[in-house]
Amino acid sequence: MTWETVIGLEVHVQLCTKSKIFSGAGTMFGAEPNTQACEVDIALPGVLPVMNKEAALMAVKFGIAIGANVNRRSIFSRKNYFYPDLPKGYQISQYELPIVSGGSVDINTPNGNKTIRITRAHLEEDAGKLTHQKKNNSSGVDLNRAGTPLLEVVSEPDLRSPSEAIAYLRKIHTLVRYLEICDGNMQEGSFRCDANISVRPQGDKQYGTRCELKNLNSFRNIDKSLNFEINRHIDILKSNGTIVQETRLYDADNDLTRPMRSKEEAHDYRYFPDPDLPPLVISDVLFAETQASIPELPDLRYKRFMSVYHLNEKDAEFLTSDRNIADYFEQVVSICGDSRKSANWITGELLHHINQNGLDIKSSNIDAQMLGELIQKINDKTISGKIAKGVFDEMWHGEGNASSIIEKNKLGQISNTTIVEEAIDQVIENHSAQVQQYLAGQNKVFGFLVGKVMQVTAGKANPQLVNQILQHKLGEKDGVPD
Amino acid sequence: MPYRQTLSSIVGMLNRNDISSVELVQCFLNRIEEHSELNAFISVDAEEALKQARLSDEARARGSINSLSGIPIAHKDIFCTTAMATTCGSRMLKDFVSPYNATIVELLSKGGAILIGKTNMDEFAMGSSTETSWFGPTRNPWHKDHVPGGSSGGSAAAVAARLVPAATGTDTGGSIRQPAAFCGLTGLKPSYGRISRYGMIAYASSLDQGGPITQTAEDAARVLQIMAGFDKRDATSSNREVPNYLDHLQDPIAGLRIGVPRNFVDDAVHPEVVGAIHNSLKEFEKRGAKLVEISLPSCNAAIPCYYVIAPAEASSNLSRFDGIRYGYRTDSFDDLDELYKKTRGEGFGLEVKRRIMIGTFALSTGYYDAYYRKAQQIRRLISNEFESAFKKCDYIAGPTSPTTAFGLGEKTNDPVSMYLSDIFTISANLSGIPAISIPVGFDNRGLPIGLQLIGRSFDEQGLLNLAHSYQQVTHWHQEIPTEFS
């Protein structure tokens, strides 16, 4: 029997607002415990939540970007349960009427394009964190994260394999960074996901019993945990066992999933509309303003990069996967006019340097203006591509822009025929043996001679001019009998 | 003696330099100490109050005067204050000192009022008699074996005994109006959203509203003036402009239509209460108001509706009292579950636990539609009924409570009969509309009777006008219990 996997994902997108979703406290990551928590986040008696407009508009942006229905009136509800990281004893979330309903994203699969439907995206607050100290058997509560805005994006069970799940996640990840609503940092938990997964015999109409996987904090862990879970389900089904519907945690150290502790069982969250928060209403003006602020989205930009800049799929996909890289690329092209060279320099030399130094494109030592000018110097034959790499290195180390480095180091290409001829004459004189070999028909010696000319001119001779004159001079020799 | 004066006359005394704030505060502090048997206060800070009074006198000498400068007031112990503990009448918060002040505490302080103490209340405002307080019951100054009403019973007893000129209260189902009625005072529950709830410990968020408890409507207008207004920290507060409440107090009431619900005179209402209400209505008629018969049939469902919605919200609001961050924590526990169970089991009293359980049940899967959703539908029905009634009349009048103050302990073992004492007050909370209770007579035991006037949304001004007009020709609001006069 062949088996079919069915996966639905719940992605928790941490919105990069300056303050929390219902309070004025900051949202800085990694601060001293409880320094990013005010009276509202600590849930002192008498405090009240007030909606952060910035967070609401970020959700609207996302809704528009996935072609969803943005509900102009949405409702906050309370999800009630006790846990020390949840100071109010309830989480403010959206239940019956979320801010975003419907929508979809397209992913690439080996079988072509596939549309993944999104059920909903709703606003909610994050919980705090517990730190367990083994030595004195106690736990600490850090409420810095409590009240950080989250957009929970729930997909339909449209994904059929871990690789589709990853493709979908990458798509959402790219999108939220494009929209500048999330920093996408998975290590810091800004982009997390839970997965609902079930397995059924291929062709079955009914879904199998599903399990929910939690604690998936990297693309790698998501892939591994889904694969583990698929095998676990298939093994149980093959031996006529029953899948228990439950929530399971992924243990990355041992690469397996295990059921969460029993206290999590049978929660009745007693959702009801939060009486402290009026319905969230998005006015026509706000909606229009938000719509206008949405940049060109990655899918469209990808297509445009291929059609306008004649890039191949790989380069176009890579360059559009990050809004800042795509912007950088377009600036470079606008300066040098050469999209192919721009793409090559960015995906090659530039990103190599950036990655090695732990930077990103925005903090790159070489900005788009500088790289554009460098490519221009190659195209107008001031320097060769090889020399350009040296110039790039110097630019990277802050030695100035391309023009000043070329000037300072006298790197300008020699296109003066007299100088090139002199160099060639010198090489022919000093390497008569090789010249004889060439004349005897060993054509590949030509390259050796060109190299020698370049050596004599410290690499600055215009290679085309060298080829042309050397060929001519050797041709002359050929004609002269010994 | 200054304590016998209304807040409004004390303002005049201070302005004329007939008395200093220090003398005034000292006078009330002495009375609070003399009458500690009422158990009206949970906390009093004499030293701080006198210090503030000195500062107020100095400021006055420099010409810096606000509308309530130098006047001592008391806050119901549900409003968070940094100056003294905020207990909410509960063991859970018996030692809790808030690091921040409630918005209305800030506002009244800016208005010049001096916080003299925090008053006793039913635990977490759950009760109609101030008997559920962890700090023991408050006694009614008119008859010490009787309750002062609740949940703002401490505030009402304190004002009635002239231990303070005015006090704040909160009203979720009648908790300002019913104690005002039981203690012969003026108690105003403003429209939902008129006064910020920030720093007012939540019982039922969609119903809770703060307000003043005073001797007269004019006093209420002065205090409301300072408490009212939009607060950016409370998303449910209204940004509607606050009128000058003193401006229209003297307006004639001729031509105003007062609706009298057909069903207010039923078996449950004590005949003496009915008599006093009828007499008061005649007084309004004499001054030119017209009485109109109206009907509010759905109001019969108000109590069951309230006792689903309020406990449901309370069950969630009170989840934060878990012994983790502040407040009471049990002495010994083996694990988290036990910490929660013992802390909440020991920290909350019987009535609070009862309502948490009712609310938890009403919200649970399978019961939500039958209880919570249904109650919300009834709530809308009641609101609509008021709306159509206000097409026929401008105000609605009736008894604040079916009876006068009942005896201490009389209803503690019968929660449902206790709940029924709020039958006339609850509808205004469910609809979010303003209502006021004013004294209109006494029963044969000398216990005060209250008239409730209900108005259209945000028509506090009209209610105060009506009440003031009545108080110009009657003396009920000037009566002081003999022992305290």
Image (cartoon, coloured by chain):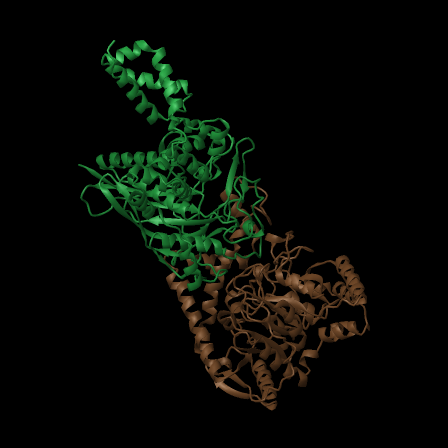
Chain colours: A green, B brown
- Give the quarter of the image for residue A381: top left
- Give the quarter of the image for residue B233: bottom right
Horizontal and vertical percent position of residue A266: 38, 47
Check the picture and name the quadrant holding the N terminus of chain A: top left
**Residue B258 shows in the view:** yes
Q: Nearer the viewer, residue A75 or A82?
A: A75
Q: Is residue B474 left or right of residue A321?
A: right
Q: Nearer the viewer, residue A4 or B123?
A: A4
Count of marks, rendered view: 0
Which residue appears at 61% of the width and 64% of the height?
B130
Does residue B399 lie above or below A92 as drawn? below
Q: Is residue A317 left or right of residue B406?
A: left
Q: Nearer the viewer, residue B93 or B71?
A: B71
Horizontal and vertical percent position of residue A240: 22, 37
Q: Nearer the viewer, residue A7 or A72?
A: A72
Which residue appears at 60% of the width and 82% of the height?
B466
Check the picture and name the quadrant holding the C terminus of chain A: top left
Q: Is residue A375 left or right of residue A433?
A: right
Does residue A23 lie above or below B377 as drawn? above
**Residue B481 shows in the view:** no
Horizontal and vertical percent position of residue B65: 75, 68
Does residue A472 lie above or below A333 as drawn? above
Horizontal and vertical percent position of residue B27: 79, 67
